[in-house]
Image (spheres, helix red, strand yellow):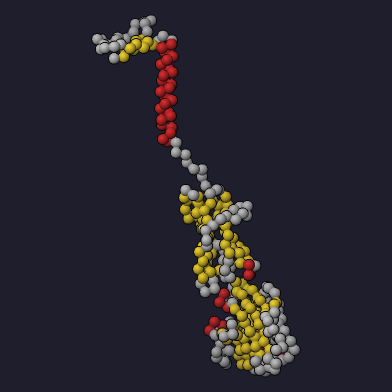
Amino acid sequence: MELLAVVCLCLLTWSGTTFAAGNGPDVIKMVVKEGDDTILPCSLSTREDIVQKLFDWKRDGQKEVFLYDAGVTYGKDHPGQDEQFKQRVFHFPDQLQFGNASIVIRNTKVTDSGNYTCDFPRLQPRRRGLIELVVGATRKPYVTILEQTRDGVLLQCVVKGASPKPQLQWQDSGGNMVPAKDPQVTDRGGSYDIILQTTVTKTDHYRCVATQEEINHQVYAEIYVYISAPETPTGWIVGPVLGVLLVIVGVIVLLALVKKGWLTLTCNKGQSTSSPGPPTEGEPFKVHNI
């Protein structure tokens, strides 16, 4: 099987390397962002005129993407094109004379990801090109504080509708990984919703980093967390301590008055027959204990 010469047009955005697929044609891996237009390249190495030829584009060997047959294409002239690609796939009529069977897909979607074949079934020998298309959907994380507990502050990071599946990680301001719970992952047919929670115990700036290695993309969201010092339960301590201090001060004052002779302490057994009157001038005050 003679291989097609696969060319990259100037409008094409792609990444990755070409690699061999067994003994068959080489496979080009292309990566584009969701919403961009992308060109799937396909060209005969002989550059022969294909205006009167037939070439057929399919995805994953089943879905009809685009068909050209001697001037007739999918649409009003030819039925059978998959609904997913109607009014979104076009070829380059002015390039057919140079053997160029490339197509452009407008406004790519995550669901466009797959393996595409460009096939010339009537040529001898038969010729075919293979392209692996990855359409990436990038989503910025959303971070929030859920609650503050005795163990610290619970943070949550959410990414919705990302593709390929991103890896999430919590980091502190120094770029150090913060331990987190196992992520909650929901697969929505090729796009992913992911929730990642962690508990932090100190004041700092924290960021949730989403990495998609397949499309060389990384994005993060940051949040500031302030954790106040824990309150000391001193109320039940201060009261008794203050009471003891007051008693000690009272005893000290009392002893000082006795020492100076301004106060006399007496202890009488039995009942007191009369209440003491106020002390006369120069006479110490006597305290009677009944």
Q: Along the line of sight, which residue is nearer the eye, 210 or 80?
A: 210
Q: In this view, does 141 lie to the left or right of 41?
A: left
In this rendering, the answer to whether 210 lies above or below 228 is below
Q: Along the line of sight, which residue is nearer the eye, 261 or 2?
A: 2
Which residue occupies 57% across, 57% down? 170
Q: Which quadrant: the N terminus? A: bottom right
Report the number of numbered marks. 0
Which residue occupies 41% across, 20% down? 250
Which residue occupies 68% across, 73% down? 16
Q: Along the line of sight, which residue is nearer the eye, 183 or 67?
A: 183
Q: Which residue lies furthest to the right in this view?
A: 46
Query: Quick check: can you spot residue 225?
Result: yes
Q: Give residue 116's position: percent from left, percent from top.
A: 62, 82
Query: Quick check: can you spot residue 96?
Result: no
Residue 106, located in which quarter of the rendered image?
bottom right
Which residue occupies 53% across, 84% down? 83
Q: Give residue 277's position: percent from left, percent from top.
A: 30, 9
Q: Give residue 127's position: percent from left, percent from top.
A: 68, 89
In this rendering, the answer to whether 23 lies above or below 238 is below
Q: Which quadrant: the C terminus? A: top left
Q: Is residue 124 left or right of residue 209?
A: right
Q: Give residue 67's position: percent from left, percent from top.
A: 61, 89
